[in-house]
Amino acid sequence: MDFSKITEVEFELLMQASEDFGRFGKSERICSRCGNSFEHFTNGNSYQTKCKTANCLDIVSRGI
Ligand SMILES: [Zn+2]
């Protein structure tokens, strides 16, 4: 995970969105920076949750 570019609050939001995607396959949370929605990708054993706006909130996590 890359914590350097986002605040703690934004990190929490991304983690919650990521959890939504894991549980429900979607998230209705809204990006706190731009108001757009989030999308989620799985790539091998890592996954990414990001704002649909380019270069906005973005987190990549390793599978647990
Ligand atoms: Zn955004």
Image (tube, rainbow, N blue to C red):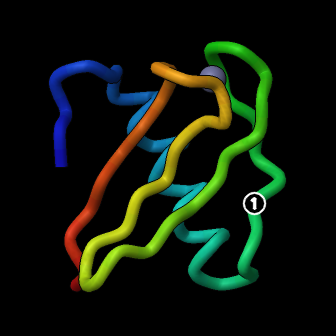
Is the CB of the residue bearing disc 1 within 8 angstroms of ligand 1?
no
Residue 57 position within the rendered picture, expressed as x and y whole percent measured from the top left: 48, 29
Residue 63 position within the rendered picture, expressed as x and y whole percent measured from the top left: 25, 80
Q: Residue at 76%, 46% (x, y): give it.
A: 29
Instruction: Give the amino acid at mark 1.
Output: Ser
The local secondary structure at tag 1 comes to: loop
Residue 48 sits above or below residue 6 on the image: below
Residue 44 sits above or below residue 39 on the image: below
Residue 19 position within the rendered picture, expressed as x and y whole percent measured from the top left: 55, 70
Residue 13: quarter of image: top right
Q: Residue at 52%, 43% (x, y): give it.
A: 50
Label 1 belongs to which residue?
27
Residue 32 position within the rendered picture, expressed as x and y whole percent measured from the top left: 65, 22
50 relative to 27 in the view: left or right? left
Q: Residue furthest right?
A: 28
Q: Residue at 60%, 36% (x, y): give it.
A: 51
Q: Residue at 50%, 66% (x, y): give it.
A: 41
Q: Residue furthest top?
A: 33
Residue 28 sits above or below residue 54 on the image: below
Q: Nearer the viewer, residue 20 or 59?
A: 59
41 relative to 25 in the view: left or right? left
Quick one: quadrant of the C terminus?
A: bottom left
Residue 2: quarter of image: top left
Q: Quadrant of ligand 1?
A: top right
Q: How many marks?
A: 1
64 relative to 42 in the view: left or right? left
Q: Nearer the viewer, residue 35 or 10?
A: 35
Label 1: how many residues lie within 10 Å, few (<14), some (14-19) or many (20+)?
Answer: some
